[in-house]
Amino acid sequence: MNVIRRRGWEIPESCATPEHLFFNRRAFLAAAGTGIALAGLPAGAMAQRVADIPDPSESLYPAKNNPKYVLDRDMTPEKVNLNYNNFYEYSTSKSLAREAQQLRVRPWMVKIDGMVEKPQQIAIDDLLKQMPLEERLYRHRCVEAWGMAVPWSGFPLAEFVKFCKPLSGAKYLKMETFNDPKMAPGQGSPLYPWPYVEGLTMAEATNELAFLVTGAYGKPVAKQMGAPLRLAVPWKYGFKSIKSIVRFSFVDKQPKGLWEAIQSSEYGFWANVNPQVPHPRWSQASEEVLGTGDRRPTLMFNGYGEQVAEMYKGLEKERLWA
Ligand code: MTE
């Protein structure tokens, strides 16, 4: 994402930056549970110290693949994905893997409130026990005109919505990332209205494609990808897919996302992928396929029109594409 300073679609810095490849994900995830402050430690030493502590959800992966979600392209290599991320809580650079290891993913409480039968809080591992885990291969298209193909694991957002028991008056689902500048130095920046917020209509939240991600590449999802719980709504630009969610609120007013709050002329509520509608500062007609050096034409609704186009009939007056 960018507002005015950076062009995110430039050559991935990650292609020239192998420094993060030695990270032992399992070790870092485990370290989170121990509360070890990671930022100052040499990565090798840290990995050694925590290598024996298992991630509490590790045995759930790999989840069974759902064969319904097939792709027209190769999976983006995990190495590429681990080293090219947007997570402004940690950095405005794409190479933020090291910084993101400061994220503590246990304990992780998820708050459910607003228009629900009964507001509640649930620990991520208790939630995982109650949700049907599966793997889905999804395209992932950033508004900055790059794309990936990712093997996410998680559960349908529709299942989670059912679990929350929303009241009939709820029209939107608002989601929030944690807010803790000590754990995420980027949140010390006054330039952004933290916490990161995103929202969906109830129809979108219960669409079969809307997916809550807890894993990727057959493992618990990496911190830099938004551990331990993030959204994947693959027909929308990537900024809608909020990371590291701690709160779900069922509301009757359209939530304003962080990017919409900063720059509503460029980033709106709907943000559906449309190759024919350029971003005010660049074309959306094609995308860089990360890890390949290729560009390819962008697909309407990122290729998911069959599942989602119906939801937007009658809403043509809305700014559906930004
Ligand atoms: N969620 C939070 N909390 N903070 C962020 O900076 N960036 C968004 C989205 N979710 C972001 C976020 C943007 S712009 C994109 S493109 C995707 O996450 C990037 O996801 P990835 O790093 O897994 O590719």
Image (spheres, rainbow, N blue to C red):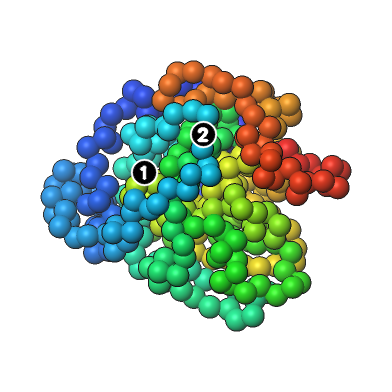
Does 126 sit above or below residue 226?
below
Q: Quadrant of residue 106?
A: bottom left
Does 130 sit above or below residue 43?
below
In the image, residue 168 lies at what x, y percent? 74, 73
**Which residue position is annotated with label 2?**
71
Q: Which amino acid, mark 1?
A: Tyr
Residue 156 bears which disc, if any? none
Q: Secondary structure at mark 1?
A: loop
Q: Is residue 25 left or right of residue 150?
A: left
Quarter occupied by the N terminus: top right
In the image, residue 85 lies at what x, y percent? 44, 38
Does 317 sit above or below residue 55?
above
Q: Is residue 264 left or right of residue 176?
A: right
In the image, residue 70 lies at what x, y percent? 51, 37
Mark 2 or 1, which is nearer the eye?
2
Q: Which amino acid, mark 2?
A: Leu
Residue 217 bears which disc, if any? 1
